[in-house]
Image (cartoon, grey):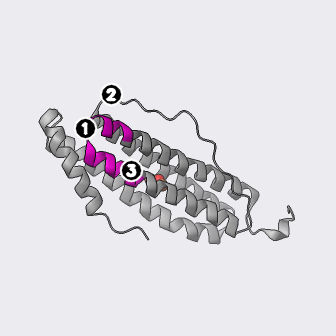
Amino acid sequence: MNDRRWKSLDESTEKRLNEQIKIEAVSAAHYLAMASWCDQNGYAYSAKYLLDQAEEERQHMMKFFTYVLEVGGAAKSPDIQGIRHDYGSFKEIFEVMLDQEISVSQSINELVDHCNKVKDHTTQSFLRWFVDEQREEEANARRALELFHVIGNDGPSHYLIDQEIAKIRATQPKEK
Ligand code: FEO
């Protein structure tokens, strides 16, 4: 059913939303790989934190996916390849996490800019939740990295940092 009257979504917006579906799915896959690395290296609290983060990203993907369907578009199930499983250090996990979250924020902001341009107020309103969510996710990733500066970056410090990582999630507001 390709009749334009059946959907309220501009073709270019539909394409960008499908790109965002893939970005969220890739984020989930990266967090799973990071969780596995942490578990294998003895960072049990961080592994749990990253597993929960992977689940959140999957929920983000599903929000985009169901939104595209709701407005009559064709949501695409993302094809994901090339997920990195090797990390050089515990700290690198959180450096990559912050880079990833900053990149997702940029992508959401560009989507909002696009909606402004094509005057798609419905999608823009839908995106507001993600703008707020990204602020929180970046803050959490920055907090994790900060721990390496305030506690240290050696073996005993890593033991403490791993426990502090669990507290970041415990103080997060509940997902809506
Ligand atoms: Fe859904 Fe953290 O990007």
Tags 1 and 3 in contact by the CB under 8 Å rule?
no
Q: Position of residue 119 (x, y in %)?
A: 67, 67
Look at the image and tell me whether residue 119 can be seen.
Answer: no
Left or right: 35 in relation to 74 = left
Q: Which range of residues does the magenta coloring cover?
A: 36-53
Q: Position of residue 63 (x, y in %)?
A: 56, 63
Please give the name of the residue rendered at 18% of the width and 35% of the height, measured from the top-left corner: 153
Q: Secondary structure at mark 2?
A: loop
- Residue 51 is marked as 3
According to the picture, the residue beneath numbered tag 1 turns out to be 42
Distance in Å between CA atoms under marks 2 and 1:
14 Å
Give the vertical position of 91 relative to 50 (above or below): above
The mark that comes first in sequence, 2 or 1, is: 1
Please give the name of the residue rendered at 69% of the width and 62% of the height, measured from the top-left corner: 118
Q: Residues within 10 Å of mark 2 (few under 14, many from 20)?
A: few
Residue 52 drawn in magenta: yes
- Amino acid type shown at disc 3: Leu
Identify the image quadrant of the C terminus: bottom left
Look at the image and tell me whether residue 120 can be seen.
Answer: yes
Closer to us: 168 or 49 = 49
Closer to us: 110 or 57 = 57
Distance in Å between CA atoms under marks 2 and 3:
20 Å
- Amino acid type shown at disc 2: Gly
